[in-house]
Image: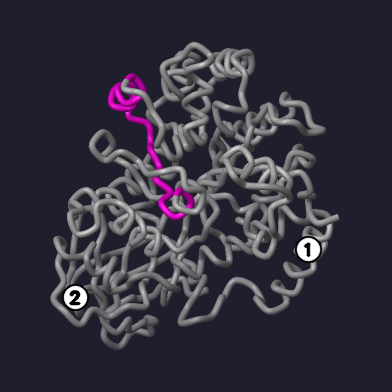
């Protein structure tokens, strides 16, 4: 990979600045300088490599704050029973799939998802993993896939009381061991993964609260929270106001926590969200697929957009959030915060050297394969992303200064041979699922 190069003739935007026609100088994996087009070339006769981006939009690399890489090899599978309720969707599809995931399937599903992510400009994934009969070493298997690509990741295992051959203590141990081993890692971190309130007993939450209080650094949680009405009802039947209040009562929520969905909540739950301000993740396409509803924007206006295993196309997910939200009545400033400011804020908690385009920051960059034909500025950027870019693959993805994807080509591996290995692993996985 080139050590020093210039990205020029592009529209540059992040959560703090906007250049209608700009350029970025990258050196040693970092952003060396940023400015207007034509300002940065240090010497017109230098051998500096230059990429003319033809007026495309350049943004910070995208973040998927709630993903399931293990779902990447699921296309083509059918439920193993009825799916007339959310619980049946879980037990007759997802829980059957994660019960047949072995080390090979975990690794190659992660690679498959990361390939898709890179093609869509994603340079950081917060993955929520489940492989109930392959627990110990599962997060390390996923980490290997991240290391091949060189993108950032925050990994966790989905701790759950649901039936499996592995004790719940092994789920907790996998999370804690991985998190503690990566405290000082600048590219891979760990969290405490929890499935959902409805598969976690009070005794398990109490145990997790005690473990967290004993750690040198408390583990932030990553959990499905209030995704379906059944999660709210379970918590209320357990003597709590709702899923957020139940977690908070065991001292498991902090400002660094990730609460995915947050659809079915009580009034007290909303109050706690405002008091503690964890990261709330809306997953519009998954919500539509499972028919569970959508976040209440009258109560929650500060959130991010995730995919919950549906894809890694963050632009399409933004469009879905718009269409499934308030549509033409949507507040563009809220969407701007959702897509630009809040991902940068999340990254600042886990990887403070990325998320914004400034000198000294990691060169994690997404260049859209979209050249605006109409005027664009900070106020109209979101409209361009929703109605102009719409979705699809990006033109270029850069992580840590390394160009991972350029004009339709993966550069960090031989994709064709890797795809053959992925297909082989998928065939075996589908055989076990259908067997």
Magenta residues (range): 268-287
Q: Give the image quarter of residue 176.
A: top right
Residue closest to the eye, 51 or 107 = 107
Secondary structure beneath disc 2? strand
Residue for point 29% across, 22% down: 271
Neighbour tally class for label 2: few under 14, some 14-19, many 20 plus, Cα within 10 Å: some
Report the side of 147 relative to 290 (left or right): right
Q: Where is mark 2, residue-wise?
A: 21
Q: Where is mark 1, residue-wise?
A: 425
In the image, is residue 101 above or below residue 312? above
- The picture places residue 274, in percent across and down from the top left corner, at 28, 26
Residue closest to the eye, 97 or 49 = 97
Residue for point 37% across, 68% down: 26
Q: Main secondary structure of the magenta part?
A: helix
Specify whether residue 305 is painted magenta. Answer: no
- The picture places residue 136, in percent across and down from the top left corner, at 76, 37
Specify whether residue 282 is painted magenta. Answer: yes
Residue for point 51% across, 46% down: 126
Q: Give the image quarter of residue 137.
A: top right
């Amino acid at each position: 990979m080139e050590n020093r190069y210039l990205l020029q003739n592009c529209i540059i935007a992040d959560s703090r600045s906007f250049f209608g026609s700009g350029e970025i100088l990258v050196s040693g994996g970092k952003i060396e300088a940023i400015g207007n087009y034509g300002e940065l070339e240090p010497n017109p006769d230098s051998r500096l490599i230059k990429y003319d981006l033809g007026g495309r939009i350049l943004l910070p690399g995208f973040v998927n704050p709630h993903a399931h890489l293990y779902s990447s090899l699921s296309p083509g599978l059918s439920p193993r029973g009825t799916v007339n309720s959310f619980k049946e969707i879980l037990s007759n599809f997802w829980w059957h799939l994660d019960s047949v995931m072995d080390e090979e399937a975990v690794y190659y599903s992660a690679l498959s998802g990361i390939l898709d992510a890179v093609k869509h400009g994603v340079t950081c994934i917060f993955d929520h993993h489940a492989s109930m009969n392959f627990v110990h070493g599962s997060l390390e298997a996923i980490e290997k896939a991240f290391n091949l690509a060189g993108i950032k990741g925050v990994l966790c295992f989905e701790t759950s009381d649901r039936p499996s051959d592995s004790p719940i203590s092994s789920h907790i141990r996998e999370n804690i061991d991985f998190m503690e081993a990566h405290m000082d890692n600048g590219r891979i971190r760990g969290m405490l993964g929890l499935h959902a309130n409805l598969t976690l007993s009070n005794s398990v939450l109490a145990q997790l609260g005690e473990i967290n209080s004993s750690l040198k650094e408390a583990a932030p949680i990553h959990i499905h929270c209030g995704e379906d009405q059944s999660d709210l009802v379970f918590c209320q039947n357990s003597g709590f106001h709702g899923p957020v209040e139940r977690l908070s009562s065991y001292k498991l929520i902090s400002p660094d926590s990730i609460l995915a969905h947050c659809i079915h909540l009580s009034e007290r739950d909303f109050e706690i969200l405002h008091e503690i301000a964890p990261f709330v993740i809306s997953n519009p396409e998954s919500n539509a697929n499972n028919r569970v509803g959508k976040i209440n924007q009258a109560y929650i206006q500060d959130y991010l957009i995730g995919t919950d295993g549906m894809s890694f196309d963050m632009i399409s997910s933004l469009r879905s959030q718009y269409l499934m939200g308030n549509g033409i009545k949507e507040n563009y400033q809220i969407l701007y915060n959702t897509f630009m400011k809040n991902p940068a804020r999340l990254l600042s908690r886990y990887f403070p050297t990325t998320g914004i385009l400034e000198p000294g920051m990691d060169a994690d960059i997404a260049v859209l394969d979209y050249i605006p034909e109409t005027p664009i500025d900070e106020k109209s950027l979101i409209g361009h992303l929703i109605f102009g870019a719409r979705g699809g693959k990006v033109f270029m993805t850069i992580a840590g200064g390394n160009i991972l994807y350029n004009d339709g080509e993966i550069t960090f591996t031989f994709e064709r041979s890797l795809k053959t290995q992925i297909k082989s692993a998928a065939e075996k996985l589908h055989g076990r699922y259908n067997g």
